[in-house]
Image (cartoon, rainbow, N blue to C red):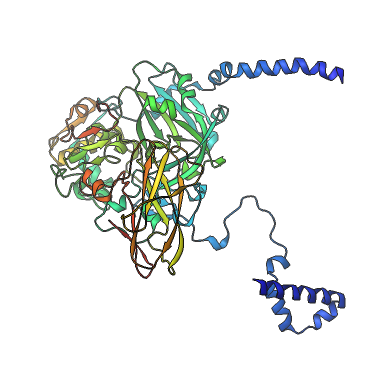
C-alpha cells in the first residue's frame, strides 16, 4: 500500500504538468497541413475578382460565342438568353425599379468578371468545367453583346473583360456595413 | 381501460388453465375463443421480434415524416431543395436524414481518402489538409439552426400557399454540429496583413462559393465534420462543410474544398445574381448574412384540421441568427390580445427554440399568430411591413409574422393578416 502511494505522488505531479501545459503547447502547434501543391492551386484557383485577377490567358469573340451558345446553352437558357426553362440571362435593363423587376446579367449583375467565373466554374450544368478559356471569353462577349454592353464584333480577353462597366455597377449596397469595394 | 384489464386477467387465468390441462386440451378449444384471446394479447408479445440492426430506421408507420421534394428544374434534377417536415417533428433537433437540402447541381459522392482542403491566397504558407489530418485537430460542438436565405419566401407572394407548412418554412433545420475551429487552420497558414475576406468554395458540380468577412469567420467559423454525433451525411457536405452559426444557409458551403484569403469580396455568382435582395429604390442589399428573428406555429398549421372545439397545445419553433430568442408571444384572437408562450429549455443562441402554449378553442373562426423577439431586441415584422422593405417578387430573408386562420370547421388556412 505504502509503495503504491509512493508511486502515485510523482504520477499525480506529472498529470498536473501535462494538464497545465496543454493550452500552451497542444492546439496551435499541430501543423498537420502540408505545403500546398502548386499545381493543385493552379488548377483549383478558378475564381475571378472584380479587378480581373484570376482571368486566364485566351480570348473569344461575340460571334464565336453566338455559335457556342446555340450549341451548348440555348436549350436551357432560350434563344439569345431569353430564358426558359433555365434562368433568363439577357434583357430587362432598366426594370429594377418597376413593378416587375427582371434580374439578368445586363440588368442586375455588377461585374462582368462574375459572368466569366459563373460560366467557367459551373456551366453548362450537365458538363461543368468542360469549356475552354476561349469559349468562356466568347460566351461572355456574346451574352454582353445581346444587350449592347459590348459591340457585336467585340473580342474579349483578360484585359478588356475586366474593364467593362456593367449598367448596374452601383446598384448594390453592402448590408454588412462597409463599402462593397 | 378497467374493463379491458379485467377481461385480460380473465383470459390470462384461462390461458394458465389451458397450459395445465395440456396442449391437447388447448388444441381442442374452439377456434373462435382462441382468436379472441389473441386479439387481446398483442402479437408483439407472442412472437419474437426481429434482431438488432446495424443502422436503425423510423417505424414503417411513420412513412409520412419525410422531406418534401421541391426540385427547381426539370433539366437538372440535382438543382433544388428538400424541405424538413417541421409539423411532423417535435423538440428542436432535426434528425440528420430529415435536415433540409438545397443543392445547386446535385450531391457529389466524395471519397474522404481523396478529398483535400486547400487554404491559400493571402497567407504566408498555402496549405492543404487531408481529411485524416483534419480529424486530428481539436474539435468543438454546438447546437445551431441552419436556414436557407430563401426559407419562407413563398409567403412573400400575393396569395399565400395553402398546402403544408414544410413547403413554406421547411428550409430550416437544427443539429448538433461538431468540427474544427477555422482559426486553427488560418493560424497555421499565417494570415497576411490586409486580408479582410474569405472565399469559401465547395467541391460540387456548381463550385458554389461565397465571400465572408474574415474577422467573423475567424471568430465563429467551424469546419464541420459531424452532425448529430455521426459524420456528415453526403447531402450535408460530407466529408466537411463550412459552418457559420446563424448566417444564411448558402454560406455554410458543403463539400468544402477551398478557402482563399482575399482583400475584397469576390462577387461570386451566389452573392450577385442570387442571394441579394432588391429594394423598391432599385438598389439591392448584398452581404446580408445574418438570418433574422423568426417564429412559426407548427401545430396547428396550414393543411391541418382541428377535429372539434376544446383544448389544444399550440407548439412551434422560434430562432434568430442574432442570438438567443428572448420571448415568443401568441395571439389566438387575431392580435387583440397577446400572451407569453412557454420557451422550452435549452434556449441557446442561433438555435431553434421550442415554444408551447395551452389554448382552448371555442369553435369559432379566429387567427393564430406567434411573434418572436430576440435578445438584441430584433422583432418580427408584419407581412406588410416586410413587403414594404423590398421590391416586388423578392423572397430572401422573409421573416414576417405567420398568420394561420382557423375556420369554423377547424380547417387551418394560411393568410396575410
- Give me the residue at 34% from left, 43% from top: B149
Residue at 46% over, 63% down: B311
**Vertical order, B396 against B19 (above or below):** above
Q: Please tell me which residue lies in front, B59 or B8.
A: B8
Q: Is residue B104 visible?
A: no
Q: Position of residue A6 (x, y in %)?
A: 82, 15
Question: Could you tell me how many numbered marks the image carries?
Answer: 0
Q: Describe residue B7's horizontal placement relative to residue B371 as left or right.
A: right
Q: Quadrant of residue A110?
A: top left
Q: Quarter of the image holding residue A152?
A: top left
In the displayed structure image, the side of residue B345 where residue B161 appears, left or right? left
**Quadrant in which the N terminus of chain B is drawn:** bottom right
Q: Where does the image place residue B272, in percent across and percent down from the top left? A: 27, 37
Percent position of residue B234, x then y: 49, 43
In this rendering, the answer to whether B2 lies above or below B240 is: below
Q: Is residue A132 visible?
A: yes
At horizontal 19% and vertical 37% (from top left) the residue drawn is B283
Check the image and report above or below for B171 versus B15.
Answer: above
Amino acid at each position: 500500500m505504502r509503495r503504491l502511494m509512493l508511486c502515485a505522488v510523482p504520477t499525480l505531479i506529472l498529470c498536473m504538468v501535462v494538464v497545465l501545459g496543454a493550452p500552451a503547447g497542444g492546439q496551435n502547434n499541430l501543423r498537420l497541413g502540408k505545403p500546398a501543391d502548386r499545381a493543385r492551386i493552379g488548377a483549383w484557383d478558378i475564381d475571378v475578382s472584380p479587378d480581373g485577377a484570376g482571368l486566364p490567358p485566351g480570348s473569344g469573340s461575340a460571334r464565336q460565342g453566338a455559335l457556342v451558345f446555340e450549341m451548348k446553352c440555348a436549350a436551357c437558357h432560350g434563344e439569345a438568353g431569353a430564358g426558359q426553362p433555365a434562368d433568363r440571362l439577357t434583357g430587362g435593363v432598366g426594370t429594377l425599379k418597376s413593378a416587375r423587376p427582371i434580374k439578368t446579367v445586363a440588368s442586375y449583375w455588377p461585374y462582368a468578371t462574375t459572368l466569366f467565373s459563373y460560366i467557367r466554374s459551373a456551366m453548362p450544368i450537365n458538363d461543368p468545367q468542360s469549356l475552354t478559356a476561349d469559349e468562356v471569353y466568347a460566351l461572355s462577349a456574346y451574352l454582353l453583346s445581346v444587350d449592347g454592353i459590348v459591340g457585336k464584333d467585340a473580342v474579349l480577353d483578360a484585359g478588356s473583360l475586366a474593364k467593362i462597366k456593367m449598367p448596374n455597377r452601383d446598384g448594390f449596397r453592402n448590408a454588412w456595413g462597409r463599402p462593397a469595394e | 381501460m378497467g374493463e379491458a384489464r379485467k377481461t385480460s386477467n380473465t383470459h390470462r387465468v384461462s390461458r394458465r388453465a389451458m397450459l395445465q390441462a395440456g396442449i391437447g386440451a388447448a388444441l381442442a378449444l374452439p377456434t373462435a375463443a382462441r382468436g379472441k384471446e389473441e386479439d387481446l394479447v398483442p402479437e408483439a408479445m407472442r412472437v419474437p421480434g426481429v434482431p438488432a440492426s446495424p443502422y436503425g430506421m423510423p417505424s414503417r408507420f411513420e412513412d409520412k415524416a419525410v422531406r418534401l421534394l421541391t426540385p427547381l428544374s426539370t433539366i437538372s434534377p440535382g438543382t433544388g431543395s428538400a424541405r424538413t417536415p417541421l409539423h411532423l417533428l417535435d423538440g428542436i433537433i432535426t434528425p440528420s436524414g430529415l435536415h433540409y437540402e438545397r443543392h445547386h447541381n446535385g450531391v457529389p459522392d466524395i471519397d474522404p481518402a481523396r478529398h483535400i482542403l486547400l487554404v491559400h491566397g493571402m497567407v504566408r504558407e498555402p496549405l492543404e489538409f487531408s481529411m485524416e489530418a483534419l480529424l486530428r485537430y481539436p474539435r468543438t460542438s454546438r447546437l445551431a439552426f441552419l436556414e436557407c436565405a430563401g426559407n419562407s419566401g413563398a409567403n412573400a407572394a400575393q396569395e399565400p400557399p395553402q398546402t403544408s407548412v414544410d413547403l413554406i418554412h421547411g428550409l430550416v433545420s437544427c443539429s448538433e454540429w461538431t468540427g474544427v475551429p477555422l482559426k486553427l487552420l488560418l493560424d497555421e497558414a499565417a494570415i497576411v496583413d490586409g486580408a479582410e475576406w474569405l472565399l469559401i468554395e465547395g467541391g460540387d458540380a456548381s463550385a458554389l462559393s461565397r465571400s465572408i468577412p474574415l474577422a467573423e469567420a475567424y471568430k465563429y467559423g467551424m469546419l464541420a465534420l459531424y452532425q448529430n454525433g455521426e459524420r456528415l451525411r453526403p447531402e450535408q457536405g460530407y466529408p466537411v462543410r463550412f459552418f457559420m452559426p446563424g448566417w444564411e444557409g448558402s454560406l455554410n458551403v458543403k463539400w468544402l474544398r477551398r478557402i482563399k484569403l482575399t482583400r475584397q469580396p469576390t462577387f461570386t455568382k451566389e452573392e450577385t445574381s442570387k442571394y441579394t435582395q432588391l429594394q423598391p429604390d432599385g438598389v439591392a442589399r448584398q452581404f446580408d448574412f445574418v438570418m433574422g428573428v423568426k417564429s412559426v406555429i407548427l401545430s396547428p398549421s396550414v393543411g391541418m384540421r382541428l377535429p372539434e372545439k376544446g383544448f389544444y397545445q399550440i407548439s412551434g419553433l422560434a430562432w434568430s441568427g442574432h442570438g438567443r430568442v428572448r420571448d415568443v408571444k401568441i395571439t389566438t384572437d387575431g392580435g387583440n390580445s397577446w400572451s407569453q408562450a412557454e420557451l422550452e429549455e435549452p434556449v441557446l443562441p442561433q438555435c431553434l427554440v421550442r415554444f408551447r402554449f395551452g389554448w382552448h378553442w371555442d369553435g369559432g373562426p379566429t387567427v393564430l399568430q406567434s411573434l418572436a423577439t430576440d435578445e438584441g431586441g430584433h422583432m418580427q415584422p408584419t407581412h406588410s411591413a416586410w413587403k414594404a422593405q423590398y421590391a416586388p417578387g423578392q423572397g430572401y430573408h422573409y421573416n414576417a409574422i405567420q398568420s394561420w386562420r382557423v375556420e369554423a370547421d377547424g380547417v387551418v388556412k394560411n393568410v396575410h393578416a
